[in-house]
Amino acid sequence: MNRLIGIGLVLAGALYPFAVYFGRGHFAPWQLALLLGALWACRALTAERRPGSLGMAFVALAFCLLLGIFDSPQFLRWYPVLISAFMLTVFGLSLIRGMPVIERLARLTDPQLSPAAIRYTRQVTRIWCVFFLVNGAVAAALTLWAPLSWWALYTGLIAYGLMGALFAGEWVVRQRVRGGA
């Protein structure tokens, strides 16, 4: 059930800009708030109790509640900023305490990482932090000053393309680092 809810949140996040753009004449903001809020409530009730996961769910629920109360089309556009802030928080905090996110992911395939690989994963986690900071700032700027079509294009397509390029670029670099080690 947790996995299904997680997939639902990822799909909702990925499709959200398109739902906002194409649904503006068909759905009220409170309706999207209700859908998102239901997904986040399920997440809060069923998710593993990891540090911060419940806090994120409550912040997202608060966002959905405010969106529902204000029923504002402009307020709809802040959700991608919130998600970037979540991701920046997760990746950033992992650099401060515990194991960096990228190291955790790397250890899924190679539990015995070398000290050089651990340094590398820490650097990649920092790069993702910069990405989420810039992505959130661009999404916020588009929310404040750009037409809805620009916001939807960036948050629904360009940002995911940039994430994919960063992921692919890191994979290429990792293969070269492994080959040279």
Image (cartoon, helix red, strand yellow):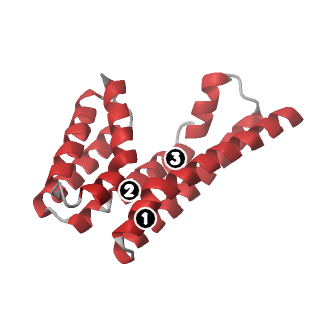
Residue at position x 25%, y 40% from top?
A: 40
Most foreground residue, 170 or 29: 29
Residue at position x 33%, y 50% from top?
A: 16
Q: Quadrant of residue 103?
A: top right
Looking at the image, do the residues carrying marks 3 and 2 touch, with CB atoms under 8 Å apart?
A: no
Residue at position x 25%, y 68% from top?
A: 74
Most foreground residue, 88 or 42: 42
Which quadrant would the N terminus be assigned to in this image?
top left
Q: Which mark is residue 91?
A: 3
Locate residue 99 relative to residue 52 in the image: left or right: right
- Residue type pointed to by label 3: Phe
Which quadrant would the C terminus be assigned to in this image?
top right
Residue position for label 1: 139
Most foreground residue, 161 or 69: 161
Residue 153 horizontal/vertical position (percent): 44, 61
Q: Residues within 10 Å of mark 2 (few under 14, many from 20)?
A: many
Disc 3 versus disc 2: nearer the observer = 2
Residue at the farthest left position: 69
Locate residue 43 relative to residue 92 in the image: left or right: left
Q: Which mark is residue 39?
A: none
Looking at the image, do the residues carrying marks 1 and 2 touch, with CB atoms under 8 Å apart?
A: yes
Q: Residues within 10 Å of mark 1 (few under 14, many from 20)?
A: many
Q: Which mark is residue 80?
A: 2
Q: Identify the mark nearer the N-term, 1 or 2.
A: 2
Residue at the farthest right position: 180
Q: Identify the mark nearer the N-term, 3 or 1.
A: 3
Please tell me whether mark 3 sits on a helix, a strand or a loop: helix
- Residue type pointed to by label 2: Pro
Please say if 27 is above or below 134: above
Residue 150 horizontal/vertical position (percent): 42, 68
Is residue 140 in sight in this rendering? Answer: no
Q: Identify the mark nearer the N-term, 3 or 2.
A: 2
